[in-house]
Image (tube, rainbow, N blue to C red):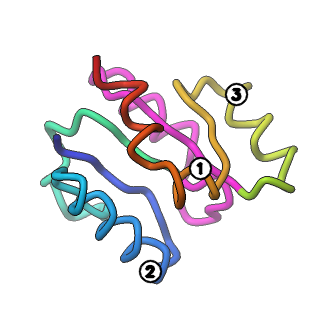
Amino acid sequence: MKIIIFEENLLWAGKLKKRLEALGHTPYLYTKESHDYEDASIAIFNLSSTLFPLQTLLKQMQDKGVFCIAHAGHKEKEKLSLGNEIGFDKVVTNGMISEKLSDVLKAHVK
């Protein structure tokens, strides 16, 4: 499955990319110049991002039928709440992304 990652922390992005590849997925890091993600099935957003206009990108992805997952630290309650408020399909903690990525993705894969 093709998955687009909206992440500005390159260390975290690299780890997430490797985890997704190990699960058999094809991950892409979002860049304004890249169109590799055009047919992505899932998008993963970091709610702590300051570079990406989350609401705008969320709407663009959901308009294309992309299942959108957001994550933030378990102590970042306000960011996790924001993710639910603005309409992400699934909001999880960073720990869930790190430790239980397969389970997080299974919720979408039916």
Label 2 sits on residue: 10
Q: Which residue is mark 1?
A: 96
* Residue that appears at 30% across and 61% down: 32
Q: Quadrant of the N terminus?
A: top left
Residue 45 x %, y %: 50, 50
Q: Earlier in the sequence, mark 2 or mark 1?
A: 2
Name the residue at 30% across, 64% down.
29
For marks 3 and 2, give the CA distance: 25 Å
Q: Mark 2 falls on what kind of element?
A: helix
Depth check: 50 or 91 in front?
91
Quarter of the rendering containing residue 61: top left
Mark identifier at residue 84: 3
Q: Give percent across and percent down for residue 50.
A: 64, 64
Vertical position of residue 37 compared to residue 94: above or below: above
* Amino acid type, residue under disc 3 in the picture: Asn
Give percent across and percent down for residue 57. 45, 41
Label 1 crowding class (10 Å Cα cut-off): few <14, some 14-19, many 20+?
Answer: some
Range shown magenta: 46-72
The C terminus is located in which quarter?
top left
